[in-house]
Amino acid sequence: AQSVTQPDIHITVSEGASLELRCNYSYGATPYLFWYVQSPGQGLQLLLKYFSGDTLVQGIKGFEAEFKRSQSSFNLRKPSVHWSDAAEYFCAVGPRTGANNLFFGTGTRLTVIP
Amino acid sequence: GAGVSQSPSNKVTEKGKDVELRCDPISGHTALYWYRQSLGQGLEFLIYFQGNSAPDKSGLPSDRFSAERTGGSVSTLTIQRTQQEDSAVYLCASSLVVSQGDGYTFGSGTRLTVV
């Protein structure tokens, strides 16, 4: 069965510090991988996605993520966090064939302190 | 339109009443999805549409939930005889299904409160 695990429910970092949000997945085959961000009262916005090729993908707002097949992971990183990055972050996986549907993790809430 | 539009943005209803939630996807997007986000929970898949048909209804939590899509555009999610556990944010998304694995564009959601 498909599953997405985000082990950190809540992370607090200082502004300017680096950030890594963890995501592990269980899937029948290598899926498509996504990170979304949800600011308070807003819908989800796509940060980045991995389909194939280079395992380090760049996204918007200075975020990047690295796909590691051996670890079934797709961790999100940012070298220097800004106060505006405070939000909820969701990792998602989707099938390469068949039904076009995404499975989401339970999210990691990021708090940024001055 | 330019984005996915959901209405109403907020809905308070009494237990036992029926509610309808509306989603207007991006023009030309053939796939449409409904998710539910309960407090402190991740996104729970409810149903998706390919055109006007719903190949996968496995996520609907009970027979009180139904959804339809007409004209390959607007979708309505209906919850009958609402219960307090139905309180959540209901998110709609659309995508170009032609491109397999394409990411979704989400609406801002409808916050449903059952009192």
Image (cartoon, coloured by chain):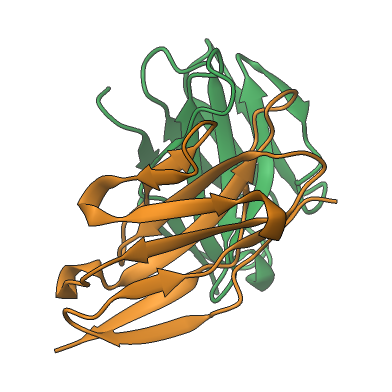
Chain colours: A orange, B green
**Above or below for A26 versus B63:** below
Q: Where is residue B38 in the image (x, y as percent from the top left)?
A: 57, 68
Which is more toward the observer, B39 or A75? A75
Residue at position x 54%, y 31% from top? A52
User: In the rendered image, is residue B81 in sight?
Assistant: no
Residue at position x 36%, y 33% from top? B4
Which is more toward the observer, A36 or A30? A30
Q: Where is residue B108 in the image (x, y as percent from the top left)?
A: 35, 49
Counting the numbered discs, the total is: 0
Which is more toward the observer, A32 or A98? A32
**Above or below for A68 versus B4:** below
Q: In which quarter of the image is the C terminus of chain A?
A: bottom left
Q: Quadrant of residue A24?
A: bottom right
Residue A26 placement, left or right of A18: right
Residue at position x 67%, y 39% from top? A31
Residue at position x 82%, y 46% from top? B63
